[in-house]
Image (cartoon, grey):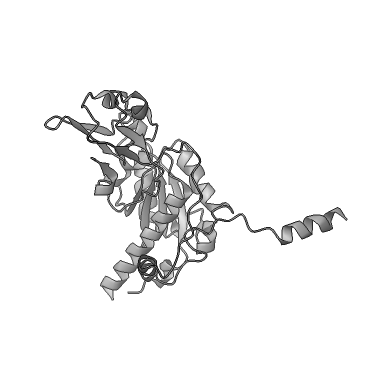
Amino acid sequence: MEIVKVLLKQLFQTPATNKFPTKYAPKSTIQFLDKVKRGELKLTPPIAVPPGFRGKISFNREKCTGCQLCIKVCPTKAIEFIPEEKKVKIFVARCCFCAQCNDICPVDALSMTDEFMLSSYDKYADELVVTK
Amino acid sequence: MSLNAIKRALWIYHINTGSCNGCDIEILAALTPRYDLERFGMMLVGSPRHADVLLVTGPVARQMAPRLKRVYAQTPDPKVVIVVGSCGLEGGVFYESYNLVGPVDQHIPVDVYVPGCPPRPEAIIEAVAKAWVKLEKAEQQVV
């Protein structure tokens, strides 16, 4: 009798799979992405990130004082100092998402966002070099 | 030239060139039922000779460099190389190690980069979609 209960329960359960970005591979990915851009199709959103997730870094240029503490603490040397402007530049390709720079920054100019879809054809692309 | 043979079901060969296994676990997670990459026809294969996509994780350790080149040469054309994880892109936390011989793109041509330490499985799926776009564009140019 126990198995009937389980069977009935499983009959009405939805699958665990998160169908990101779509259920099956489209015939043409370029056309599919065009349709998404025009709003004709909707993508299944990715699984929500947990609270406190460390995604792509964001930098508040106005707040930065150029103290270079983040450069000292960065374990991957992902942060570069621009002496002319006394600001920093962060290479996301190098970043290990440890958020130590966020903790040490005295003016809270650095913070982590929820953005994690970062793949690109070029590792020094504009969206992977955080300057502002 | 038509790329139909490789466009539909990309077979993946995963090579670890000295990674800490974090990215390897995320690749595995992308294949589990929660993300289920196999619904796109993707499958991890045991030999580079069967593969269309090389998934490279890890900074390139000195011992791995000739092996990486050999695996790349063994993969039949047309092929796509996806680098997963910050180590493969720039060295990541191992950047100053005496035993590394540079990031992956110093040894083999790379098509798509996935930053993250480790990247989430969705980011890897997005990279595969970008590889598809690249293949389709290449096909349009040839035809």
Q: Quadrant of the C terminus of chain B?
A: bottom left
Identified at 38% across, 35% down, the residue is A97
Q: Residue reaching furthest right?
A: A1
* Residue B41 appearing in the image: no
Q: Quadrant of the N terminus of chain B?
A: bottom left
Q: Position of residue B13 (x, y in %)?
A: 46, 53
Q: Position of residue B79 (x, y in %)?
A: 37, 60
Q: Is residue A128 above or below residue B10?
A: above
Q: Residue reaching furthest left?
A: A84
Identified at 43% across, 72% down, the residue is A27
Q: Is residue A43 above or below residue A89?
A: below
- Taking depth in this image into account, of B76 and B43 the one nearest to the observer is B43
Q: Position of residue A88 (x, y in %)?
A: 22, 33
Q: How many marks?
A: 0
Identified at 41% across, 67% down, the residue is B7
Q: Is residue A53 left or right of residue B99?
A: right
Q: Position of residue A6 (x, y in %)?
A: 78, 55
* Residue A116 appearing in the image: yes
- Taking depth in this image into account, of B8 and A59 the one nearest to the observer is A59
Which image quadrant for residue A108?
top left
